[in-house]
Amino acid sequence: MTTHLAYTRKGSGEPLVLIHGIGHRRQAWDPVVDRLAQKYDVIAVDLAGFGESDAYPAGTAYTMENACSILEENFAEWGVSKPHVVGNSLGGAISLELGARGLASSVTALSPAGFFRGFDRLIAFFALMLLKVASYLPAGVVRPTLRSSRGRRLAGRTLYEHGERLTADEFIGDTAALRNGSAFFPTLRAGLGYHFDSPVPVPTTIAWGTRDRILPYAQSGLAQERLPLADHVALPNCGHVPMIDDPELIVRVIDQTVAGAKAADQAA
């Protein structure tokens, strides 16, 4: 089974793959891509059934096993082996899975899925469903709200602390990606029952927005329990998609993770 994934590639150096969250698209990484491309061969990818990537063939389940297998196949097509991987939300969980399978040189997971506690699944489910329902509002209805920075901040409140940093066109593009993502519902169904508890034998950082409204910051405590050897970093005043809220901090966190992987390789 091969699904060719759409991607944007910039820069040179060690390969660094960026993986977005459920309902999003590779443009989520735009605030950090150019900075990262100064040091790395950066590949921002659309997951299958999201953005510009085709869905899986009919009958193929949206499991972590399949997500990792498809990415491994695409790594080979792109000419990279064991890249550094960075993921947000669903992409963070996939990044951890890639690290656990020995398919990555390092992992940076930003508010990764898979560390639900108590009613957290319901919080995530209703937040994501509200975003999905809102994505069907006509652009003509939504655009007037997006003309002001205050309107964009309020419209993006679920995902960002600083939604005003997105342009109206970026909001409309993200909304269209969420509306048209054919993988949203099967991925959501699979994700709500998912938990991550595997060892990750490569340098790993788990960074969590303290203002995350979809996967609350308290979940970082469970991540620390399950992955005590990882570096755990708080992202102050950042929401669920921290690349928007503090791109400079995210680049620093990624740089530190990659530097740790290089140091580990040299020590070995």
Image (cartoon, rainbow, N blue to C red):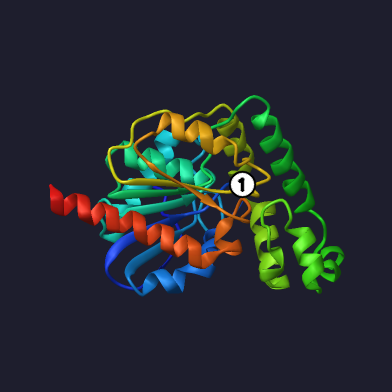
Counting from the top left corner in percent of width and height, residue 123 is at 70, 35
Residue located at (39% from left, 38% from top)? 97
Q: Please, is residue 163 above or below residue 128 in the view? A: below
Q: Residues within 10 Å of mark 1 (few under 14, many from 20)?
A: some
Residue located at (70% from left, 31% from top)? 122
Horizontal side of residue 252 vs 115, given as left or right: left
Counting from the top left corner in percent of width and height, residue 43 is at 39, 63
Counting from the top left corner in percent of width and height, residue 13 is at 27, 69
The picture quadrant where one finds residue 98 is top left
Q: Which quadrant would the N terminus be assigned to in this image?
A: top left
User: Can residue 1 be seen from the camera position used here?
Assistant: no
The picture quadrant where one finds residue 128 is top right
User: Can residue 67 be seen from the camera position used here?
Assistant: yes
Horizontal side of residue 35 vs 264, given as left or right: right
Residue located at (65% from left, 61% from top)? 174
- SS assignment at label 1: loop
Q: Please, is residue 39 above or below residue 198 in the view? A: below
Counting from the top left corner in percent of width and height, residue 159 is at 67, 53
Q: Quick one: 103 or 58, which is closer to the camera?
A: 103
Q: How many labels does the image show?
A: 1
Could you tell me the amino acid type at mark 1? Answer: Ser
Residue located at (28% from left, 43% from top)? 202
Horizontal side of residue 252 vs 131, given as left or right: left
Q: Mark 1 points at which residue?
A: 182
